[in-house]
Image: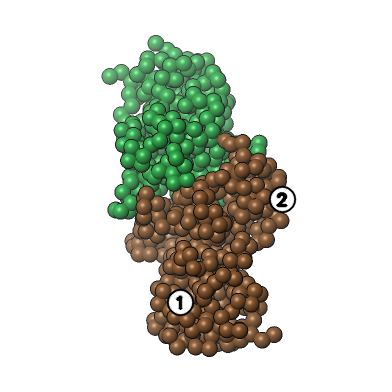
Chain colours: A green, B brown
Amino acid sequence: MAGYNVIVVGASGAVGQEILQVLEERNFPVGELKLCATARSAGKEMLFKGKTYIVEETTPESFDGMEIALFAGGAASTEFGPLAAEKGVVVIDNSSHFRLDPQVPLVVPEVNPEDVKAHKGIIANPNCSTIIMVVPLKAIYDAAGIKRVVVSTYQAVSGAGAEGIAELTEHTRAALDGGEVVPSKFQYQIAFNLIPHIDVFQEMDYTKEEWKMVKETRKILHDDNMAITATTVRVPVYRSHSESINIETVRKVTANEAKKILEDFPGVIVQDSPADKVYPMPLYTSGNDEVFVGRIREDNSLDKGLNMWVVADQLRKGAATNAVQIAELVIKYGCLLKK
Amino acid sequence: MAGYNVIVVGASGAVGQEILQVLEERNFPVGELKLCATARSAGKEMLFKGKTYIVEETTPESFDGMEIALFAGGAASTEFGPLAAEKGVVVIDNSSHFRLDPQVPLVVPEVNPEDVKAHKGIIANPNCSTIIMVVPLKAIYDAAGIKRVVVSTYQAVSGAGAEGIAELTEHTRAALDGGEVVPSKFQYQIAFNLIPHIDVFQEMDYTKEEWKMVKETRKILHDDNMAITATTVRVPVYRSHSESINIETVRKVTANEAKKILEDFPGVIVQDSPADKVYPMPLYTSGNDEVFVGRIREDNSLDKGLNMWVVADQLRKGAATNAVQIAELVIKYGCLLKK
């Protein structure tokens, strides 16, 4: 099988490393591989399928001869994304910059794969918390309709990158051993604490993270008026985001029916056997590509409603895996820019 | 001022120690003080107002000559509570055993103080998560009515007592240093993890903790049909429970009006200035008696709704402080059993 020329931009960061890992695990048909990042990371060595690659500084020329560009996120997306698309490279972008652009498909492969076909060079990867929520939501949406969603998140520190991971360890050691806690990546000490503040505050005193969950979900489900409200909270967990999701449905769904619907949906693993202490937890979902759903209950406060507890590795399904799945769709649908 | 003879049962545990502290801080009119616990803790020395007391094993005779008994919770409540009341001692009980008994008032002093007057010897202290939620709920309930509540909790390990605290430290050190993690008090490793399982599973696959939040809130607000649904989760935080609360109101309330209503309510401190990174966090509320409310927002998904983020020290307001406040009401209303 002939491979495709792939460039990973931001390869050395937390998401970039996962992208490489996922490309290898899924045996993505890679032809030429180019790893790029900022000047600071240039020169770093990374392994892919046993071969060593040197990270280069991203320049406009980096995209010459490439077919698919996976952007891990950050400022590089705005600087190089449109330019790469102009050069005929299909850009799959993990930054928030293009997500709500009507010209740019926002895709979760289990939910709206066909949207990929409409791309004009750039396809956006949704926010991690949005991806994790929208997979099980879509299952219920198709089966029973959704009137309203109330979600509260419990988000891991790796959502803030490698520095977030390091800071949780630093703060934890300092808190245990009596050292000084110096917040840098987070607003306050994150060890043994909760911070209800992710990204910047915007209209109505919601954070940008909360608005992402509202607006991106509407776009992915093609339902501009869907009622969703969110509260997002950083928790002292290294990896995998968790979400407590309350869903008001159009048609009544029993807990057993909901479990069946979710079990049958691609990309979902139901872990729900309370008597056996089986429910999803972030410590045990990390490293996996699926969205884990448990604590599935009829909402006792409504005629037609469900509660569920949803956990997934936000660096995998919430970022890298979803991006590579989009690249696979681009190939499957034959919608590369260079034929 | 003459003091009242007070016995604290379970004095040496996490809640018992707080009760002593709160009695001292609030300058509760203590006459004779007796500290009791199980045989295992008998002989332990504890300080109250600079004087050393020896913890005794609880026996039926422990209650002779006493006027107020503060039970920290656990099996002692069922074993000695009714007996103490028969002996003319007003029992303020922190266990879950009597809370839903129609003969037993369930009291949060800021919410339903008058209910104390109907006691027949036992007054129940509500579940910690319930107390923390019902204080701000009552403010909104009185001002605008409440149709429905969706709550997700983030509960500290000290809700599981001193052993919970020790286990978080043990698990954290083991996780950081590569040692073996042995869950004992909790179902799984709690360090860097979340466990959506507090207390036992009951009907509809809700936990007992979740049902407590539903049923106790209805009883305290005297609203048997109030629509409430809860998801309760243990988080790696030492102290202070946090709750993401979504409220559907009867009358529309703006965020600014809600802030004013909450600021004016006794026992509530509003911490809500997002631009200044001001919102409640468990690390900073611990040791306080008030319920802290922030992230107060109109619910963008409803015409009439609010989101808020509520944090309080569950060993203080969620247990010890609330119990001592009830004892103060018993004195204020003159409803001791011995006149």
Q: Outermost residue, top direction?
A: A339
Q: Amino acid at mark 2?
A: Lys
Please check whether the numbered discs 2 and 1 fall on a single chain: yes
In this picture, is B101 found above or below A231? Answer: below
Side of B117 where A1 appears, left or right: left
A71 to A41, vertically: above or below:
above
Residue B29 seen: yes
* Residue closest to the eye, A109 or B114: B114
Residue B83 in the image: x percent, y percent? 44, 80
**Percent coordinates x, y for residue A63 in the rendering:** 48, 21
Identify which residue is drawn at 67% across, 61% down.
Answer: B266
Q: Work out whether mark 2 precedes mark 1 in sequence or the reverse, and give the earlier one.
A: 1
Question: In the rendered image, which residue does mark 1 sit on?
Answer: B81
Picture layout, residue A125 above or below residue B81: above
Residue beneath the point at 69% across and 51% down: B261
Mark 1 falls on what kind of element?
helix
Residue at the outermost left position:
A1
